[in-house]
Amino acid sequence: MTGPPRPRRSVPSVLALRARARAVPWRADLPASLVVFLVALPLCVGVAVASGVPAELGLVTGIVGGLVVGMLPGSSIQVSGPAAGLTVLVLDAVREHGIDSLGALVLATGVLQLAMGALRLGRWFRAMSASVVHGMLAGIGLILLLGQLYAMVGRPAPGTGPGKITGLPALLVDLLGGRVAPTSVLLGTGTLLVLVVWKYLPDRVRALPAPLAAVGLAAAVTALAALPVARIRVEGLLGVLHPPDLASFATLAGPAGAGTVLAFALIASAETLFSAAAVDRMHHGPRTDYDRELTSQGLGNALCGLLGALPMTAVIVRSAANVQAGARSKASRTLHGVWLLLFAALLPALLGLIPVAALAAVLVHAGAKLVPVRRIGALWREHRGEAVVLAATAGAIITTNLFEGVLVGIGLAVVKSAWQTSHLYIAVEDPGDPGDAGHPGHAGEPGEPAGRAGALRVRLTGHATFLRLPRLLDALERLPADRAVELDWSGLRHLDHACTDALVGWAAQHRARSTGSLAVQPPLPTAV
């Protein structure tokens, strides 16, 4: 017997539940957006100053990253804005082409990213060697760290990576000899100390992001004590916008300008998509669509170029803060752009209170975090080849430039992979040797057979490429000339042209000089 029918929900109650479900993400996204804003504010300003442009341009890029890219499809959680990873490249571009050409370069970067997104090339960035990426970040971090050490003591940094390194002894001598401003040094050192110890403080204190707390304390001390240190120059949000004119696009016609655009696009795209992969592992929400994210970044960079601002990329520090603060949707990253816009419009004078030494200390700390010290140690213990690629990439970036250094790293990664995948095994079996159980020996180790009864059986397996050609020929040429040989290369998965040519040549010489017969299965081609 069935019971009485359950009462059906009224229409208003269903609508109320749906409205409550829609409201839940906002309860998490609103506070998360404030956290991301507090993290992004000092970093936007610091990256701009380190890039050699007005501080407000960093805020402009952060605003575009929030208000525009934040609403576009691709990733729902990661946050975009000016990144420390592009600081070195932007500084070089500004020095070489001038700040008036920056907008044209960034606009062209956005157009190139849009083209890559339309061609669905976003997923191919996932094929980049992790060691090359970490080496790239390590090289950028070291250059950023070394350059900002000079800013902490109020000295201009040398223009090249080797120059920054070789100038450190003289900087240390000046520091110990009292020939630099002690106030700036103490202020930068204190800011750096706050950044280092902040994570050990109670949770209630750490609710305030470390960069904001460190810069805020430095600004308060500077203002209260009236310290004679350099501060951020404030020009106003509208006063720093430099939309590209027709003359600035002439920069794109030269190889240097085109190379800068290509470097901007590749590095920004790689950092964005690797950041997306890392952020996807931090939450259980929707996964990133790499092609759409690349398109969104292209639109953002195109708009930044039209405004004459810095290039943008997705930033792992801000994205991780967004996830850890409990963000549920795109609303958090969009709102963080709103808070940046309100700050830049209503409180720009506060930027003038920030000491340059404090921002330099923030960037020294950020640069040090880009160097994966623990990862290098783990790679050296488990995969030394990967550690070599990482270190070589970082070293090449420091000694040359970012683009050439990354190309060096990619080349080394390809060579390493080719060497590791071209394994060739040679087994020499002698039926006349009672102690020979047919154990396969590696190339170059066929041994000396004891018996002379039957034919020597030589089996090749694996991949025979030109990289293994010396070992292959050494093994074959050490076979005795008075014995019959049976060569079986049917187990090879790959036989390139160089090894094919070498086998044909060896077989012809063996038949001409040896008193024993030679049988080859399958038959070798008659001509190569």
Image: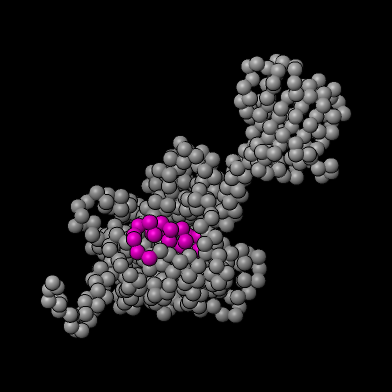
The quadrant holding residue 318 is bottom left
Between 40 and 459, which is closer to the camera in this rendering? 459
Is 281 one of the magenta-colored residues? yes
The residue range painted magenta reads 269-286
At x 52%, y 62%, the residue is 123
Secondary structure mainly formed by the magenta segment = helix
The number of discs equals 0
Is residue 507 something one can see in this rendering? yes
* Above or below, comparing residue 82 to residue 374 in the picture: below
The reply, left or right, for residue 264 in relation to residue 318 is right
The quadrant holding residue 46 is bottom left
Give the residue furthest to the right: 512
Is residue 305 something one can see in this rendering? no
Is 163 one of the magenta-colored residues? no
Between 314 and 438, which is closer to the camera in this rendering? 438
At x 85%, y 22%, the residue is 515
Quadrant location of the C terminus? top right
The reply, left or right, for residue 411 in relation to residue 167 is right
* Above or below, comparing residue 369 to residue 435 in the picture: below
At x 61%, y 71%, the residue is 251
At x 26%, y 52%, the residue is 198
Residue 30: x and y in percent read: 26, 71
Residue 33: x and y in percent read: 30, 69
Quadrant location of the N terminus? bottom left
